[in-house]
Amino acid sequence: MIKMASKPGSSFGCYVISITLVHLFIIASIVSLGTCQSVLNESSTSDDDDDTPKAFFIFGDSTVDAGNNNYIDTVPDNKANYKPYGQNGYFQEPTGRFSEGRVIVDFIGEYAELPLIPAFLQPDADYSNGVNFASGGAGVLPETNQAMVIDLPTQLSHFEEVRESLSEKLGEKKAKELISEAVYFISIGSNDYMGGYLGSPKMQQSYNPEQYVGMVIGNLTQAIQVLYERGARNFGFLSLSPLGCLPALRALNSESNEGGCLEAASALAQAHNHALSGVLKSLQEILEGFKYSNSNFYDWLQDRINNPTNYGFKDGMNACCGSGPYRGVFTCGGMKEVKDYKLCENVDDYVWWDSFHPTEKIHHQFAKALWNGPQTLVGPYNLHRLFAKTKVLRDLTIADLVDTTNSGVPLVDTSEL
Ligand SMILES: *[C@@H]1O[C@H](CO)[C@@H](O)[C@H](O)[C@H]1NC(C)=O
């Protein structure tokens, strides 16, 4: 994924990052000045046409990359197509996924009864049920790990290619239907804050944290807007994790704070999450037919990090694979300068697979929660409802109302998710 170029200044953690709703409305209004209304409704043909395959399009970074980086010229940090990645044997060999097996979108695809969604750059990839454009190390901003990743604007242009090829293959009408019924999953932002900001003295000089978060959110909002203009309607988002508690960032912090989490990084993630929730609420007001599923996994993951045994883990602090303090030195696989690394015995005891990425078990729990988790964690739609083809299933049901009664206490036991 990324390497921190330098240790960030500790004074940084003192900033209070707050992006007001007013800002967000401004951002949302500016980006909505495009021609979004013009393509509206053209594609609202029969909701029940079951000949059109369901599709799942994925954008983002190493949290969801299914192997695109195998095909680009980049540094070993941004690749995962060597052992022990993929060691659990679910796939025959390392695939480029940054885990010991599957990642979140593999599980979601399975719940949606789709075949495995291929990486866009995989030769002969079949796009009929969607495609995965994500690239390990990528950020929202093109400056993040520039020239070493497929950045978000490029991922969007790849989507445009796929959209055109679907039109040729299925015909205009069917392709439009597929595009508007598909689910678009976006998991990106961590690299903008880690390498892109905390690892970049230049960025820190040019922008204060609040300005920087505003810039990332502004660009992410534009990306959502571009997809919407091209006919996308159903969006899913994975919130950012407590970034400062990744083994890699904890290790950076090991001398100063006896191995506590790097608060500056977590604060940025939290500010990003708050800002994105605000933007999504505004977009829902502005863009007709825009539906989304946002998640709040920040506290969810923090709780597993702090209290691993409550959730079937033994270790929430150290990585399974890596070296140095917390195995936070990103050496897993020995493909970089440092060839030595340690590997744990039982991956399922761990929250963290390598210095930056969670284990398959966490990905699995994430996916279950996104699929049908309670509204305290995922909303306003969960992915199950976003994937539902008929209007009846998508609209609120009595069960949903029951879920939100009892003053926000979820009826579903969230610890199971
Ligand atoms: C998008 O990011 C660029 C830097 O890459 C920045 O100059 C621009 O202002 C950002 N756009 C928005 C809408 O925030």
Image (cartoon, helix red, strand yellow):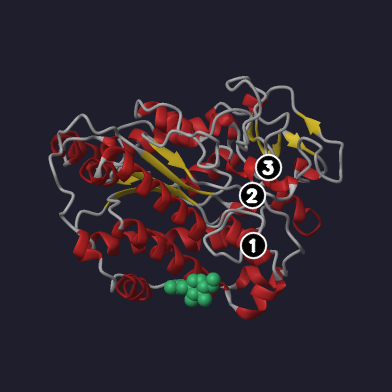
In this orientation, which residue lies closer to the viewer: 164 or 38? 164
Alpha carbons under labels 3 and 1: distance apart: 15 Å
Is the distance from the Cβ of mark 3 to the nearest ligand 1 atom less than 8 Å? no
For residue 35, side relative to residue 340 (left or right): left
Hey, what amino acid is under mark 3?
Lys
Hey, what amino acid is under mark 1?
Gln
Where in the figure is residue 331, as x and y percent of width and height? 79, 41
Comes first in the chain, label 2 or label 1: 1
**How many other residues sit within 10 Å of disc 3, few (<14), some (14-19) or many (≥20)?**
many
Asked if disc 3 and disc 1 are in contact, CB closer than 8 Å, the reply is no
Determine the image quadrant of residue 209. Answer: bottom right
Comes first in the chain, label 3 or label 1: 3
Res. 195 visible in picture: yes
Residue that carries the numbered disc 1 in the rendered image: 146
Where in the figure is residue 402, as x and y percent of width and height? 19, 36
Residue that carries the numbered disc 3 in the rendered image: 79
Determine the image quadrant of residue 183. Answer: top left
Q: Identify the disc placed on residue 218.
A: none
Res. 417 visible in picture: no
Q: Residue at x 17, y 35 (%)?
A: 390
If the image is split into quadrants, where does the C terminus sit? top left
The local secondary structure at tag 3 comes to: loop
**How many other residues sit within 10 Å of disc 2, few (<14), some (14-19) or many (≥20)?**
many
**Mark 2 or mark 1, which is nearer to you?**
1
Q: Identify the disc placed on residue 245.
A: 2
For residue 91, side relative to residue 186 (left or right): right
Q: Is residue 349 above or below residue 266?
A: above
The local secondary structure at tag 2 comes to: helix
For residue 415, side relative to residue 335 (left or right): left
**How many other residues sit within 10 Å of disc 1, few (<14), some (14-19) or many (≥20)?**
some
Q: Residue at x 18, y 40 (%)?
A: 401
